[in-house]
Amino acid sequence: MAPRSTSHRSLSGKVLAFFLFAGLLAVTLKTEGGEGKSSSNSKSGSTRIFGFHDGSAELDLEGRFMTVPDPKLAEEHLRILTQAPHIAGSPQDKATADYVAQKFQEAGFETEQVEYRVWMNYPSEVSVDITAPAGVRMHGPTREHVDGDSWADDPRVVMPYSGMSPSGDAEGEVVYANYGSLQDFERLKQLQVDVQGKIVLVRYGENFRGVKAHLAQEHGAAGLIIYSDPADDGWRRGDSYPQGPWRPATGVQRGSIGYMFEFPGDPTTPGVASLPSLGDDQRVPPERSAQLPTIPTTPLSYADAWPILENLGGRDSPREWQGALPFTYHVGPGPVKVKLHLKQDYRLRAIWDVIGRVRGARFPDEWVVAGNHRDAWVYGAVDPGSGTAAMLEATHGIGQLLKSGWKPSRTIVLASWDAEEQGLIGSTEWGEQHEKELANAAAYFNMDVAVSGPKFGASSVPSLKQFLRDITRVVPSPDGESVYAEWQNANRPGAQPPPELSEAVGGSRQVSAAESRPDVPVGDLGSGSDYTVFLQHLGVPATDISSTGSYGVYHSAFDNFSWFQKFADPHFLYEQQMARIFGLEILRMTQADVLPYNYEEYGQEVAAYVEAAQKKAEAQYGVHAISFDEAIRAANRFSQAGARILRRQKSPPSDPRKLNETLRAAERALLIPDGLPNRPWFRHVIYAPGEYTGYAAVVIPGINEAIDQRDLSRSREQVGTLAAALNRAAAVLAHQH
């Protein structure tokens, strides 16, 4: 069905939204089965929503909210936010902060711009040259350009570079290492190809670009080039931009290579907020920061990588390493030699988070935090402008409720984060600054890449998976069904698979390591977006949402308003959809009498994680090398305690404060004070980004990474650490009984 157009702030549009909401609600109320779904109570005449004594007032509030988010206003926001390149710390970035602050204030939020001073690089000089064999020439990076789109020609477009790369000069023979994964480097060893002192060439995809740099550094490479192969997001996928949505020949993916799997945020202040008043003596010297790579690294387009790959010698690459350029790929080394020259301008730079607050009338110390980052490598129409535009329309809707006299029960905190692209910096610094206050936070809701197409997906902690499903049941999709129904249809057997995903939407579309119920899949949270500090450092339950499509221009100058309007959301109806979902997450969590967590589902998933880890350990070490009995008992105890407290949540006391305190404390009980082995900033025992995946989640990471590294002693130790945390969380939940 073709998307319907919506008139600007039209009364008919608001009436339509109200009736769509009412119709979807009626369907939801008739739906039988499943925990946490809304249901009608014929005896009392009240409407039940999980977490509410009587959901009637909440449904009325949500219905009023749903009429406000406006596609035309979302379009206006995006047009303004993307009118100039606005890399973090630039004057144009500050202008977007001022715009967001204005919209927060207009909605009635108490608003502030919070400045941090953080260690970041801009590129001063970047060059990549082929120096051998004679007669082969390439001088890059070539400026991005396509006929028919002048956006890339703006002189303010930053040249392609890798955030957090060191300066340096390196020259050597080239070795091709496919995606630069741990398995790819091991395959090179099997092929007797030595990368020591070489320039390693890898393609984007499969893992976080910082992991590629980490592995190249570990294996002794002199430098690293990361290019975009047309097999992954170029012509192999479909027509290139501007004819189609895929990456054109000169398109380059910028991005940070900072080791965010060590810790995110400012590289010089792990665990400490990088406020302007912080003295140099309180910072880690950059040369000692565990987050900063040591080998020069830079990105290239496939137009520039072409002559390097075409002239490589050595044996044929493994056939699965073959990309889409029209010749056989070889692994080298040589005879192609390349010289890298990188001069980075590192300094402490100002960035600006925009924070809007409305104080809660009933539980003012319990915060519901929701955010999206604002900075972009260039224009950032999809990443992150689509998220900011949707957040501003959610803010608009909440603002209309405030103007009608409504007051939230919990404190709402809206956040526009800065310098996410450089390493999740703005959110991390703010989270570290407010660690004490966030101990009482009810949830953090994230929306980064809100819209690159029509397919909805989400990730979250297991306790909020049903909460997300329930929200999507009452939000209409542009095609007329509920978002939930569209989500369900897209995941039926035989349905067209969702698009392969760029790193941009890695958080919201991660595959779940375990599904405890046959329902729409909600993925696990790894890293790569601003929920990281909240969940994995502070233990705040989190979600991440996105609506995705054929997005081939990630982190390039072509991720601009023209691309978005042509290929992502021409009528801005998915922007409206995402504003509604985001806003309803905030409203329902803000108003809930009892926090709508489902620890039964959490416990079931954790039990599945432990069972999978046991099988993995048996395959690695043998059947009797490690006893998982203690962890299995603890996981079952946690699951059983979750089931008992879920029954308590469905028949809550008139004063739910102690019950809510227990529910909040259970997630925090899964934090380990000393953090993960060798990565102490990450304190969550269940979820962390993988050391060799970066964005993708590793569940029960202490155990799984120890097994992967064949460290038997640490594997046994981490089984005990996991069991202790699960027992701790189970004891917290059982305290209510």
Image (spheres, helix red, strand yellow):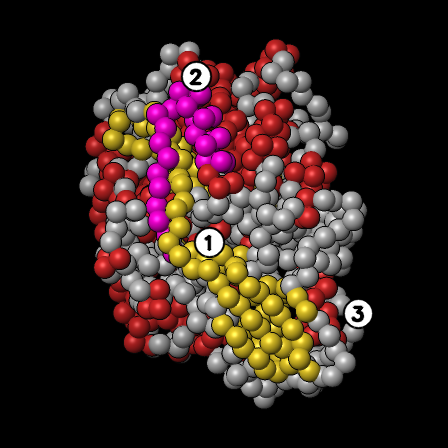
Give the residue drawn at x 52%, y 84%.
196
| Residues at marks 2 and 3, CA–CA distance in whole angstroms | 58 Å
Q: Which residues are magenta?
A: 95-119
CB-based contact (under 8 Å), mark 1 and mark 2: no
In this rendering, is residue 506 above or below 50?
Answer: below
Q: Assess disc 3: are there few (<14), some (14-19) or many (≥20) residues with their C-alpha within 10 Å of its C-alpha.
A: few
Is residue 129 shown in magenta? no
Total labels drawn? 3
Q: Which residue is mark 3?
A: 326
Q: Secondary structure at mark 3?
A: loop
| Residues at marks 1 and 2, CA–CA distance in whole angstroms | 35 Å
Quadrant where the N terminus is found in the figure = top right
Q: Which residue is mark 2?
A: 401
Q: Is residue 706 left or right of residue 554?
A: left
Residue placed most toward the observer, 684 or 556: 556
CB-based contact (under 8 Å), mark 1 and mark 3: no
